[in-house]
Amino acid sequence: MDIEPAREVAGPPALTPVVEFDGVSKWYGNVIGLNKLTLRIPAGVTGLLGPNGAGKSTLLQLATGQLRPSQGSVRVLGHRVWNNSALMRHVGLCPEQDVFYEWMTGYDFVRTCARLTGMTGRGAAAAAENALATVGMTEHMHRPVRGYSKGMRQRTKLAQALVHQPRVLFLDEPFTGTDPVARRDLLDVIRGLGKAGHSVVVSSHVLHEVEMLTPNVILLHHGRLVAEGQIQQIRDLIDQHPHRIVLVCDDCRLLAAKLVRCADVDGVKMLRGDQAVLIETRRPDEFYARLPAMSLEDGNTLREVYSEDNNLEAVFKYLVIK
Amino acid sequence: MSRRPDLRALAALFVLTLRQHFRGRRLLVLSLLFALPGVLAAVVAVTSRGAPAAALEFAFVFNLIPHALAPLAALLYAAGIIQDEVEEQTLTYLLLRPLPHWALYLVRLLATLLVTTFLCVVFTTATFAVIAVTASEPAAAGLIGRAWKMAVLLALTQVAYCGVFGLLGLLMRQSFLAGVVYIAALEGLLATIPTVGRRLTMMYYFRVLVLRWLAPAAGRDWQIDLVTAPPARTCVLTLLTVGIVSALLASLLFAGREFRMKTPEGT
């Protein structure tokens, strides 16, 4: 695995951070969960990306005060997190674990969570109804949780996380196990929370989910920060890897024959039964500059040009996989 | 940011803990076990016509309930105050609230103490009543007074037992097994051996209090010399101190401890 220091990949965002990790390491015995992690997460929606075991859940558990850093310090909204219960008024977490007090109804569960933050009975009831309405669970809120589908359970977990109107919301793999409809609805809810001014940190190992939510990402791998910043920022800084560009034209074989002779093209591959050409280049600017002229030559009109590298999946592969 | 515990939040936690305790199979099993002394007393009273109430009370109310059932109830509930939440992975929902961890533990312990004391008192009183009704030689005189004193005694032992078993639940994963061994070896065996060692058991102080406050005729079987035994006040203070010190130690331990919730992938 090629793991590059984060600072060499992209600089930290300049905005005021809501979450700060300063040289944080977390060990579980001999196993390392996070390794000297330093990062700043700004306000807004941020995606936390990495494969299983990357340290995403450890990061979220540290950020919500459930774990104590073995080394370094974690601050949220400028306050130390560990053993700071007062801070929990401003923090919400939708945990990855699919667990509830199963004997409760969804409404009872969310209202209980609201009451545990110190709300009055009436205030908690209203807050629970609002939170459940936000996640689209009003219709089912009086049914026992044990009878909920996976999507309903995820929404209810999300409702308990935002019932006390936290300023920072951490969502740990909120789309796990949901069907496409529930996934779309949850995406809408999270986008709405971001627009409503909440700072949201969403962890996922499915890249396109995060890509649909926000361009701001943090990439973790093996407990280390691989990259942080905007997807395009990150992409711009990994020029040691060849860019992959797909070209669609009338005669792709003719175009491919021409491209293999270009000095700035490292590789050519036919795609979709010769309906498209995939090229790899380490000098994308030069290549793009020559494209208009190329398009006019031989009457072989380029109908479509796009870079596969704008996809987070590609960025992630570049950064962490050989 | 205010670090003072929010009383409304703590009250909500107290209610949640009560609701958790008053449901599920644990309560059902314990209720059946606690009903056993009353049933057995009735069976003995009916089948052996000469059984006097005092003997039945000594066997079932002063021995079976406080020696076996009361500590077992405390063990089953108190050792799981946090352990159950960890196993169910629902502890996250409590840790994410603005509740100081030490207060979180103490409130859950308080609710647990209330439940186990309630169980002990209700079923002990019921056993008293069954004996009074079915025994061939009724001991109705002073029944309410005895039941009341016994309730106080059981509440005192529950303070000590819940405190100790709550701490045990935080210290070791196999707390149930360790607790059963503790109940059998120390509270069961050591407490009956007339040596200085039995002063290390809660049962000794309970028995001294029973002898001083209720003076059962068969109490001499316990081989406790009231002349050399500690006074009632010392016994009460000992039981309370054991419970409170254990609770405070456990709350500090809980406050300083992290609980890692495993993710489905086991990361």
Image: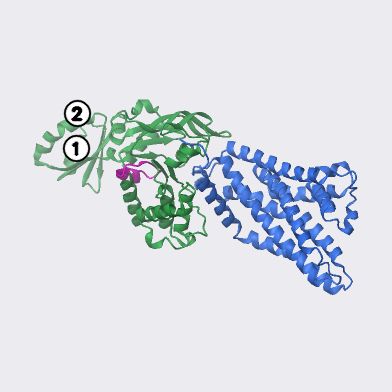
Circles 1 and 2 in contact, beta carbons < 8 Å: no
Residue at (81% x, 58% y) in the render: B62
Percent across and percent down for residue B240 are: 72, 44
Circle nearer the N terminus (1, 2): 1
| Residue labelled with disc 1 | A257
| Residue labelled with disc 2 | A286
The three-letter code of the residue at mark 1 reads Ala
Percent across and percent down for residue B102 are: 59, 40
Residue B37, placed above or below residue A1? below
Question: What chain is colored green?
Answer: A
Task: Chain letter for mark 2, please.
Answer: A
Count of marks overlaid on the render: 2
Question: Is residue B204 toward the left or the right of residue A92 in the image?
Answer: right
Callouts 1 and 2 on one subunit: yes
The three-letter code of the residue at mark 2 reads Glu
Is residue B14 something one can see in this rendering?
Answer: yes
**SS category of the residue bearing label 2:** helix
Residue B55, placed above or below residue A218? below
Please state which of the two labelled residues, at mark 1 or mark 2, is closer to the viewer: 2
Query: In what quadrant of the picture does the C terminus of chain A appear?
Result: top left
Question: What chain is colored blue?
Answer: B
Closer to us: A13 or A29: A13
Question: Is residue B176 toward the left or the right of residue A36 in the image?
Answer: right
Closer to us: A282 or A236: A236
Graded by Cα atoms within 10 Å as few (under 14), some (14 to 19) or many (20 or more), the crowding at tag 2 reads: few
- Magenta stretch bounds: A194-213
Percent across and percent down for residue A317 are: 36, 37
Query: In what quadrant of the picture does the N terminus of chain A appear?
Result: top left
**Image mark for residue B69:** none
Task: Chain letter for mark 1, please.
Answer: A
Percent across and percent down for residue B97 are: 49, 44
